[in-house]
Image (cartoon, coloured by chain):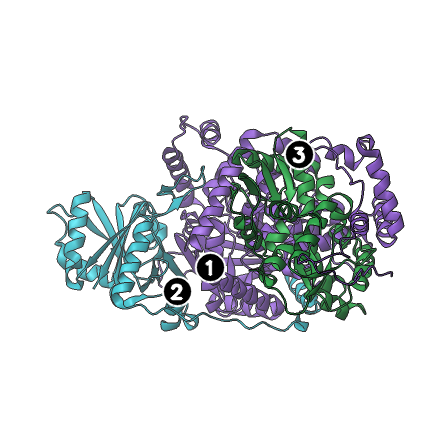
Amino acid sequence: METAPSFDFKKNIEKALSDAQLRKNLRSAMDILVAKRKTVFPDADMLERLRTKGNALKRNALIQLPRLLERLEANCTKNGIQVHWAETAPEANGIVLEILRRHDAAEVVKGKSMVSEEMHLNHFLAENGIDALETDLGEFIIQLNHETPSHIIVPAIHKNRDEVARIFCEKIPDTPYTENVEALTAIARKTLRARFARAKAGISGVNMAVAETGTLVLVENEGNGRMCTTVPEVHIAVMGIEKVVERLSDVPPLLRLLTGSATGQVITTYVNMITSPRKPGEKDGPKEVHLVLLDNGRSRILADPAFRETLLCIRCGTCLNHCPVYVRIGGHAYGHVYPGPIGKLLTPMMEGLSRAGELPAASSLCGACEAVCPVKIPIASLLRRLRHENVRENPNSVVEGSGVGKNLAETLVWKGWVLANLQPALNRLGVKGVSWMGDRLPRIGPLKEWTSVRTAPRFAGKTLHERIKEDEIVKSRNWDGKVKSSRCKARKF
Amino acid sequence: MNDTARERILSRLDAAGLAKERPGAVESPAPETWRREEKIRRLQSQMEAMRTEVHVVEADRWIDRLKAIVRKREWKEIVCGAGSVIATELQSAWEGGGDGLPKQVFYEERIESFKEYLFTVDAGVTSTVGAVADTGAVILWPTPAEPRTLSLVPPVHIALVDADQIFVSLDEAMQAQGWKDRMPANALLISGPSKTADIEFTLVFGVHGPKEMIVLIKT
Amino acid sequence: MAKTPSRSMKVYFFGTCLVDSIFPEAGVAAIRLLKREGVEVVFPKAQSCCGQPAFNAGFFDEARTVAKKQLRLFSGPYPIVVPSGSCAGMMKHHYPTLFSKTPELQDARRFSHRVYELSEFLVRVLDIRLKDQGPPMKVTWHSSCHALREMGVIEDSKSLIRQLQDVTLVELEREAECCGFGGTFAIKQPAVSAAMVKDKIEDIARTGASTVLSGDCGCLLNINGALAYQKTPVAGVHLAQFLWERTRGNRAFL
């Protein structure tokens, strides 16, 4: 596994929170995406039925995953698509490199693919002398600036137009400074067009792969995806193994959920369904199409019935759009390939709790994400499960690093909490003690952080138990004046 | 080496206890049924919302409409598929250019030699195998006669739709046309000119695919 | 007209640990609201916490131990009314999971079916009618996350506020956005939590309301702390306490 850059979550967060421009950009971008999604799904009941269907289709695919992958491979192969299997990212990179070398492809054009980010493919190819140019506008921008995507769908959303103008002016030869978005887009079109025309190979991701027909389905708006998968003589598609669906008829509802949730569109400009390379007699299309199936920990995660549901994900990004944490810190703060709620699940699962154990705790469990997830992943419950794995050693855990977050202080806190909650006397004593201290409670530990932006909590002089007993609140008159017989049900257990 | 990876992945999946779960029932809502006029109307309005120029013409007048469109644009050359139905119809009606009409070029060679030309021509004309009304998209199944890049590279894409081949939904199209048994190398849904909103969500048309799309619905 | 049950309806009241130790008057108010409708309220002594804090922190065994105690204290066949969306959500939706694969599962399921959040109970079971007896005022409402997404009771809560004739409800711009409490989240991610509560109270201040209402004491603790720190002249009050104060008139304590 490649060493990820050092990850100081706290520092990242502080940096992001203090970046007013970033927060402004993020807030307006997320508001737009949330509103677009609402507009494109106006009927709440229909959306709910569609989500239920999406969940069922994807679950059924996961349940049959080994057989569907075999069927996908058989049908692809029958149609001339060459299928490769890779357990790890380095293996997948090796497969891609070997194909490119065979074709002497020193320059390739690339469509957007989060799996290729998992592979750190561009970096690997560059180290091996191959220039992989990102062609999706957002990816193109951040590649020029040596950044990674900050969002699954709109990778450059943290940038505003003057930043883009500066990047283009500085990094693309003979380019004037312009903040006009049409002009900036025209610059990208012109620059990339030359590359589309001469690239020997194109690399893409896959939104869904249909086992029944051996078809790769790709969606996009710009046309760069079609350029990458049609013009060069070689097309290499990389895909996580969980992206396979059983039938062609599964595609329309999943497409609707994907495009509606990701960008608030009923359909993208292009839906591209690839089933074979150039057929005899055809004049264009790649002569070779390769599909690289990447595992990278997915088969391990699938063995846990709860964590398995994470792999329902269709990479729409809407959980990010609705997350109160994401909107304040942006994608880069998470320090790994996938940000946001889904990232807080995938990263510890794929890379282990030793590396990413802090991520699952970075959520208030507000549930906004799972309320909108098109395939109903129970994100909050899974975050909780990961927190549990983090503090409990479990030799059978599918996640690396279980128990790594266990620490004496926290263990004692919760043991003490149990005691206080089982022993009413102890509880009352504790509350009395704290409330007696009032403002004199030392500002240490949790209280220190709390009181940096809030006044300290004031414990009541009398608990509810005491108030009820004192005022005989449950042993009293009804409002119509009739006295009820004593029904004080203070039970002792 | 590759087999080992395949075998190891599959055996891990087989051991993952997936079969213990029972598949869920997948319900489908009752499909919409729209009349022909409604389908035409919806296709037009959805595509126009995505900046497509839509013309509804009588089937035998489509060439006249196309001529009117191209004359206004003052294009020099348009390309269509060699040996395609459109090519044959257009050839007789075009009279080899002149009269303000662009020169008609045919996609006769393979892309390797045709590429350079394709990147300079003004517009490409293709047929379609149908359209989807609920989302507003035309369906292309590129063939030897009409290659894929015909609808991708030229800055303007002109597509001809037969009104009788407009389906309510993609699902209906897939079923009615029996897609699953005969998928082409590359099936496409196209809902308008290429676009992006990657910079500050400002919508810009004409990125890497065509800048403009013109659809002629033949009734 | 309130639905007066022909036989006195009996309910359990689960106060919640935050009400017990920090907001007892909210609990008192809730009980009085129920009793005024002719409901007999039973308050099992020694009740404590629903277990949610430990559960959310990943300490499932500890949560289960404390939850088990509540199962025993509330074992009669009566509805359990809870003045908190998050505690109600914990008990209604998560107890079955917490007790899955344990001998208590059946008890936990039966318990969960009897759980009601307070607003939900007042509106859907008691069909409460409120007569506003206070002076005109402007309030705003914060939707706590679990009341909204787990219990689905926000419309019930707001309908209660709207029954009060002289109370104007001005909605927040981002009513449903999390206030940043999240239990241990406020401790483990203090910077993000602080940013969230700061935005929430700025939203509150912009409404011009004098009071912000919520059905959840965790949120109130968080919001009130920030309001006080910023010296924003808005008071955060639990819905039950607000409804009781507005409608009790001159009636002495029952």
Circles 1 and 2 on the same subunit = no
For residue C91, above or below residue A137: below
| Residue C226: image tag | 3
Q: Amino acid at mark 3?
A: Ala
- Packing grade of label 1 (10 A; few <14, some 14-19, many >=20) is many
Please name the residue that numbered disc 2 is placed on: B170
Is residue A203 toward the left or the right of residue C180 in the image? left
Q: Nearer the viewer, residue A80 or A263?
A: A263
Report if the CB atoms under discs 1 and 2 are less than 8 Å apart.
Answer: yes
Q: Quadrant of the N terminus of chain C?
A: bottom right
Task: Give coordinates of residue C186: x percent, y percent.
Answer: 71, 40
The image's mark for residue B74 is none
Q: Secondary structure at mark 1?
A: helix
Which shade is chain C?
green
* Residue B30 x, y percent position in the rendering: 42, 71
Residue A166 image point, x, y percent: 47, 27
Q: Nearer the viewer, mark 3 or mark 1?
A: 3
Residue at the spot 59% in from the left edge and 55% down from the top edge: C153
Residue at screen point 83% across, 45% down: A410
Q: Amino acid at mark 2?
A: Leu
Please tell me if label 3 and label 1 are on a single chain.
no
The answer to whether residue A354 is above or below residue A442 is below
Of A248 and B79, which appears nearest the observer? A248
Chain B colour? cyan
Residue at image mark 1: A255
Alpha-carbon span between mark 3 and mark 1: 44 Å
User: What chain is tagged by disc 2?
Assistant: B
For chain A, give the colour.
Answer: purple
Between C92 and B195, which is closer to the camera in this rendering? C92
Q: State the SS at label 3.
A: helix
User: Residue A9's image quarter?
Assistant: top right
